Amino acid sequence: MATEAIRYDADFLLLNKRFYLEEEDNDLVAITDRLKGLESLFHRGRQRLLKRLIARYGASPYVDAGCGTGLGLRHLPSGSTGLDINPRNMQKARQNAPLANVLQGDIENMPIRPGSVATVILTEVLEHFPNPADVVAHMHALLRPGGRLIGTVPSHSPLWNLRFLSRSSAGEPYHDNYSKDELRAVLNGRFAAVDLGASNSSMSLYFVATKDAAPIAHPRELTAALR
C-alpha cells in the first residue's frame, strides 16, 4: 500500500537512489518503439496518454523529472529540460530528445530556480520513492503559481500480476502501486486542485495537480483595493 506510515531511514533512501545511479539500465524508448511484447504495449499507451495530457494542460517552460531515456521528453517543446539520476540514460535521452536540455541529477535536488517552471512532468517515477510526499514537495516548489504537475503512477490493476513477463529490471529496492485515494492523499498535501483518472487499460492512474495562484488578499486589503 502506498503510505508513509512506515518510516524509511536515511540508509534505505540512499540505497534506493544508488540502485538507479549505479545499476538500473532500462531503455524505455527502445522497448516502446521496437514492440517487445506486453511491456511495449503498456508504454505505448502511457506515451499516448502523456501526449494528450500535455496538449490539454501543459505550458512552457517544462521540466521532465525522471526523464529516463526521453520517452516523454521527446514530445515536449524545444528548450524543455529533462533530468534523470541515471548516468547511462544521458546519451540516449540527448539522442531521443535533441532539442531538450538533458541534465543528470537527483529530482529531490534539482539545479532549477524555485517558482520558475510552468509544468513538471512526473510519469512512472513517484512509485519508486518510499518518500513520495517529499518528492511532491520538491515538484511543488519548482512550479510557479498556477503551474501544474502532470504524471502517472501504476494502479492496483490485476494486470500488474503479469509484470514477470516484463523485459525490464524488477530488482529495484522499492516499487509501489497506488489507488486513487492513496495518490490523492499524497498530492493534496501540497496542491490546491487535483484531478485524477484511470487509463491505459486501467493500469495507469494519471494526475494533474495545480499549484495555488498568488495568495488571495486579506478581506480588508481586498475591500480597500476595490474602493
Image (tube, rainbow, N blue to C red):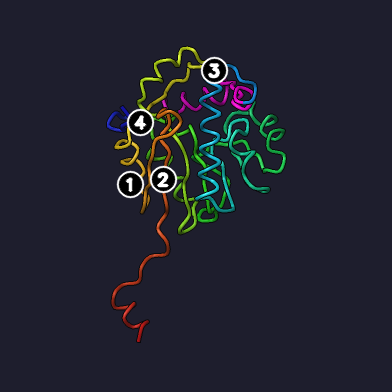
Pointer 3 residue: 168
Task: Looking at the picture, tell me which residue is in the foreground, 142 or 42.
Answer: 42
Q: Amino acid at mark 3?
A: Ser
> What label sits on residue 48 in the rendered view?
none
Which of labels 3 and 1 is toward the front? 3
Label 1 and label 4: CA atoms lie apart by: 16 Å
Q: Earlier in the sequence, mark 3 or mark 1?
A: 3
Residue count near mark 2 (Cα–Cα under 10 Å), binned few <14, some 14–19, many ≥20 = some
Where's residue 24, x and y in %? 56, 21
Question: For the point 36% across and 44% down, which residue is it?
Answer: 187
Label 2 and label 1: CA atoms lie apart by: 9 Å
Q: Magenta residues?
A: 10-32
Task: Using residue 163 as the reference point, say whether residue 219 is left or right of it.
Answer: left
Q: Amino acid at mark 2?
A: Ala
The quarter holding residue 76 reads: top right
The quarter holding residue 192 reads: bottom left
| Secondary element at tag 1 | loop
| Residue 26 in the image: above or below residue 181 | above
Q: Amino acid at mark 1?
A: Gly
Q: Main secondary structure of the magenta part?
A: helix
Pointer 1 residue: 189
**Does the CB distance between marks 2 and 3 fall below 8 Å?**
no
Label 3 and label 1: CA atoms lie apart by: 32 Å
Q: Earlier in the sequence, mark 2 or mark 4?
A: 2
Residue positioned most to the top = 164
Residue 23 within the magenta-colored segment of the rendering: yes
Task: Looking at the picture, tell me which residue is in the foreground, 160 or 86.
Answer: 160
> What label sits on residue 178 in the rendered view?
4
**Does the CB distance between marks 4 and 3 fall below 8 Å?**
no
